[in-house]
Structures are given as structure tokens and as C-alpha cells.
Image (tube, rainbow, N blue to C red):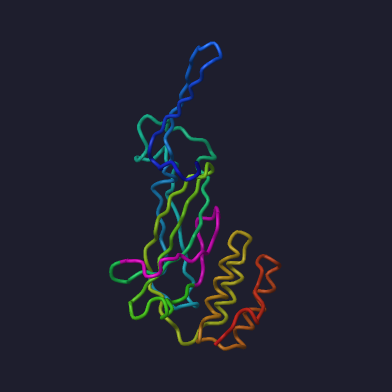
Amino acid sequence: KQNHLIPGRSYTIILSSTSSSGATGSSSISFTVSLGPQEGLAWLAPQQGEAMTTPFTLSISGFIPWTQSSTSPSSLSKRSSFFDNVFFYTISYIYVDQHNDAWISTSPILLVINSTNTEFTTLLPSCPSSVCGNVPSAVSMLITTTDVYGAQSTIQSNKVIVTATSTPNITRIINSLNRTATAENPLAVLHILLGLSFSDQISSDDFNNILNVASSLNGMIMIPSQSELSVQ
């Protein structure tokens, strides 16, 4: 049954049979469910910046197959093939409390799906008052790492402070759109547009300018129409 087995536990499957003459026999196989890639690190920099203006870069490193990690049973083979070291990263961000790292938003916001890149740069919004209220907030990244067999593990990066800015840098936003517009992370472009569409710190003319740039990115992403995204 899918998603029923518990990662890290060992199981034995036994098949028994009886012939028409009454003879019996059985066979068994034992296996351990992988915990997914282990020992990875994720670092988000710089430690502080302005919303939708400062480029933040996430760097991922150190992941190894579970069978090679200290958490795997000693009975498992530590040998691995080239493909055992191929990992796919799904990246999202969350708002956390600056003081105790508690999650403020319960639903991570998706940026990248199944990329093999270990470095990713994007703009980030400050936490909307409708979500964070008066809680001093920060932003942290969640990285779900999947191996070629489908086993997954999730880690959380350090937190960074993203402050609201009264004057968004339009040139930087356009440059960020061009930089993040790859076939591997089209969601990042849409994320930037959505972040801008809910901002009251950018004019309609500037937003339409940015939307036109995004629309010229050769079909890498389906850009919403101007009527689908509204600027206050």
C-alpha cells in the first residue's frame, strides 16, 4: 500500500503456498525502507534584505545516499552507484517567528520542483500583515530532496530577515526575472509576479512593465493576463 511503510523500519514479506496434493512451501524477503538522502545542509544569504529588491541565494550541499550515512543499519551495503548520488530538490519558503523559529504560515509556498541545481537565487516578499499580524517575521526555506528511487527527506535552511521597502527597485526585479527564468524553475517567475501583484508599493505602470518582460520569456511559464493580476 502506497505511503504505508515507515521510513527507517525493516520489513519481511513471506509468501506461502500449498499445492493440490497438500505439499507446502514458503519464501521470504526482508528489506529496510530508506530515510531518503541524509546529512545535507542549506544556507540562505544574505542574512537581511529588502522585499522584492534584494536577491537571496540558497546554497545546498552535503547530501549523501542514506545507505552511506550514519543513520543506516550496519547490515546494509555501503556501496553505491553513480545514480545513487543524483538528487532532485523541491524548494519552498515559509514565514517564521524571528525569535523562536516557530512557523507563522502553515502552508509552504512553492518555488522550484525537482531541480538538480544546488544553487538558486530569487527575490522574496515580506510577510503580509494578513498572515503575520504584529509578529516579527523572517523567511526560511524548506528543501525536500528526492533520490532516484523516490525516497525523500526534508531540511530547513537558516532564517533571513526580509524588510518591506517603500521604493522597489524595478531594474533589479526585471533582472531577477531574467535570471530565474529557466526551464527548471518557472514557478519562481510566477512567484515574483504574484508577490508584486499584492504589493501596494509599486505603481500600475511599473507592474505592467515587469509583466511585459515576463511575457517575453518564450513560453517558459504561462504568464497571467493583466486582468488576472491586480495592483492596488
Percent x, y for residue 48? 39, 73
Asked if residue 117 is among those painted magenta in the image, a careful observer would answer yes
Q: Image quadrant of residue 134?
A: bottom left
Q: Residue at x 41, y 51 (%)?
A: 40
Q: Nearer the viewer, residue 103 or 208?
A: 103
Q: Is residue 22 left or right of residue 46?
A: right
Q: Residue at x 40, y 69 (%)?
A: 105
Q: Nearer the viewer, residue 8 or 73?
A: 8
Percent x, y for residue 68? 41, 38
Percent x, y for residue 155? 40, 55
Percent x, y for residue 93? 45, 65
Q: Residue at x 46, y 62 (%)?
A: 58
**Which range of residues does the magenta coloring cover?**
101-123
Most extreme residue toward the left is 100
Q: Could you tell me which quadrant the C terminus lies in? A: bottom right
Question: Is 137 located above or below residue 200 in the figure?
Answer: above
Q: Nearer the viewer, residue 112 or 158?
A: 112
Asked if residue 172 is among those painted magenta in the image, a careful observer would answer no
Question: Is 36 located above or below residue 222 in the figure?
Answer: above
* Number of numbered callouts drawn: 0
Q: Nearer the viewer, residue 219 or 107?
A: 107
Question: Is 24 located above or below residue 92 in the figure?
Answer: above
